[in-house]
Image (cartoon, grey):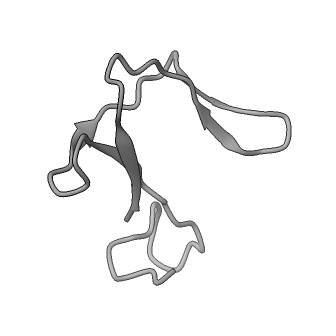
């Protein structure tokens, strides 16, 4: 992972960075559309891992995690 200028979340040289995650959904692995993460469905588990619980009405769906 590479951090670019402007990717920090605090005063310059504070040593703090912000990692922004997004989820995109596709039915065909060609066209991906934003899939919103909501606060009630998104938590940090006791092991420190991000968990996102959701249901999918589609029979076939593919998801891509994007990080900035």
Give the percent coordinates (x, y) of residue 12. Answer: 44, 76
Say left or right for 10 vs 31. Answer: right
Quarter occupied by the C terminus:
bottom left
Image coordinates for residue 11, horizontal then vertical, percent: 45, 67
Residue 39 in the image: above or below residue 62:
above
Where residue 8 sits, quadrant-wise, is bottom left
> 53 or 61: which is nearer to us?
61
Asked if one can make out residue 22 in the rendered structure from this viewpoint, the answer is: no
Picture residue at 52% right of the left edge, 66% below the top = 17
Residue farthest to the front?
59
**Above/below status of 38 relative to 23:** above
52 lies above or below 15: above
60 lies left or right of 2: left
Measured as percent of width and height from the top left, residue 64 is found at: 38, 53
Q: Using the image as rendered, state which of residue 31 and residue 28 is in the foreground.
A: 28
In this rendering, is residue 57 above or below 27?
A: above
Q: Looking at the image, which residue is at 48% across and 59% down?
A: 19
Q: Residue furthest left?
A: 31
Q: Residue 61 in the image: state x and y as whole percent.
A: 35, 37
For image coordinates 56% across by 24% down, the residue present is 53
Q: Is residue 52 left or right of residue 61?
A: right
The residue located at (22%, 48%) in the rendering is: 28
Relative horizontal placement of residue 39, taking residue 34 as reference (left or right): right
Outermost residue, right direction? 46
């Amino acid at each position: 992972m590479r951090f670019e200028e402007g990717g920090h979340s605090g005063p310059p040289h504070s040593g703090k960075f912000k990692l922004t995650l997004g989820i995109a959904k596709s039915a065909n692995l060609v066209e991906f559309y934003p899939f919103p993460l909501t606060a009630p469905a998104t938590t940090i588990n006791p092991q420190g891992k991000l968990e996102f619980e959701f249901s999918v009405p589609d029979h076939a769906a593919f998801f891509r995690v994007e990080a900035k």
